[in-house]
Image (tube, rainbow, N blue to C red):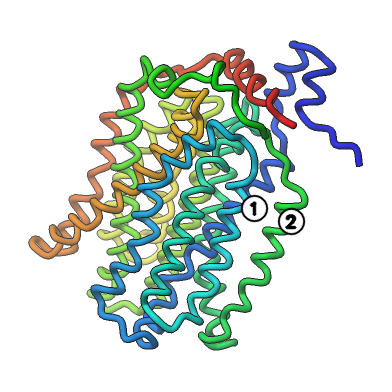
Amino acid sequence: MVRYDTCSVFLQEGVPHRMKAANQLQRSRLLLVTLGHFLNDSYGSFFAPILPVLIEKLSLSLTAASGLASIPSITSALFQPLYGMASDRIRGRFFIILGPLLSVVCMGSLGVVSHAFLLALLLLLAGLGSAAFHPQAVAAAGTVSGARRGLGIAVFSFGGSLGFAVGPLAIIGAVHYLGLDRSYYIILPGLLGVLVLLMSLHVPTGKTDRAHMASLVEAFKGVQGPMALLFTVAVLREMTRLVIATFLPIVFAMQGRSLIAGGITLSLFSLAGALGGMVGGALSDGWGRKRIIAGSGLLCVPFLYGVLHTDGLLALACLALGAGMLSGANSVVIAMAQELVPSRAGTASSLVMGLGWGVAGILLMGFGSLAEVIGVQRALDLTMTVPLLAFGLSLWLPHHVAPPHTRATRAGEFALHEE
């Protein structure tokens, strides 16, 4: 079978064609990497929906249950930057396939464990796989998107968001129809998806020549300030999203609404955020990364505030618009991080996506303490203003990171390492 890839085009056609190919959006590769994101995150979302039955089966305390739930987030925050540095040195698809495989097998086996220690081990392995997957996968998504990096990373992010929306429904259905002890059958479709990746996914591969690769100090030289700002913006926006996703159902329960209403609300919140990320990423390629990051941070505030202070369809509309704008810059933040540090795209992505979102998860615990003191409703009202702080900081971000011809040259250099 003849394989036509970027490398063969580059070697045969010379520098002008090299730059042209580097700017092209490679749709099939992008869709395959996005499939990996969908598999990784859909199976990664299995724990919370079946936690009540696991608590009953294993006689877990609430403290133990919350500790188990934090394992994947902490693992991702600690290890994702390390995997990001590794993926910058050894490019390929190993981590892109390993992550979904561990997620499918470990998270699909939660129902059969007989001890809390084994449950913790499965969550730890799945967290390590997810930490390994994201830096290499998002770097590959940016590379195969060519000049449309914002759109490509938005599509990639949409796959993960869709997985988070579908995963809970899938595992609840498996437990309902098959029983908890036989829910492991849900592993089979995931393994089929991993097999598709193994057979079809081809991304830039090879070990990077260290002599031509900038050290971490050199790679981040001159962009420490913008990266610090971008990291802080990512933390503030993700903390806001986590607070809303975690405590909005509690507010609804306090208002006497049903659990179904809370579940539908969270599904709408996730789907609207996914669509917002697609739109924001696509617009950022033409309008600029900074405008989307700043504008979405400012505009989401009144809509998020309206969720708690309106009723009926107006509240749902506010939720959809607020979620879309709040998550609309996630892929844009990642794209800007990659453009700030193009020679270390995996490391840069993992800092804002892994470490940054992990820090946001830790800050979530502080919100719980605040809510106990002043009440959930008032604490949520305060949290809705946090994106304003992110907006203010984003005004100091650079307008232009790298001109198109520079990005094309760097992408071409990356692609020349393909096998």
Specify whether residue 402 is in view. Answer: yes
Q: Kindly indicate whether the residue at mark 2 contacts the one at mark 1 (C-beta within 8 angstroms).
A: yes
Give the label, 1 or 2, closer to the camera.
2
Q: Which mark is residue 196?
A: 2
Residue 55, quarter of the rendered image = bottom left
The residue tagged 1 is 35
Q: Amino acid at mark 2?
A: Val
Residue 286, quarter of the rendered image = top right
Residue 22 to residue 350: above or below = above
In the picture, measured across the screen, residue 261 lies left or right of residue 13, that is left
Q: Nearer the viewer, residue 300 or 270?
A: 270
Where disc 2 sits, the SS reads helix
Q: Callout 1: few (<14), some (14-19), or many (20+) C-alpha neighbours within 10 Å?
A: many
Residue at (23% x, 74% y) in the render:
254
Q: Amino acid at mark 1?
A: Leu
In the picture, measured across the screen, residue 221 lies left or right of residue 94, that is left
Residue at (74% x, 11% y) in the render:
15
Q: Earlier in the sequence, mark 1 or mark 2?
A: 1
Q: Which mark is residue 95?
A: none
Residue at (24% x, 36% y) in the render:
389
Q: Callout 2: few (<14), some (14-19), or many (20+) C-alpha neighbours within 10 Å?
A: some
Horizontal and vertical percent position of residue 133? 54, 48
State the residue lying farthest toward the right.
1
Residue at (46% x, 24% y) in the render:
341
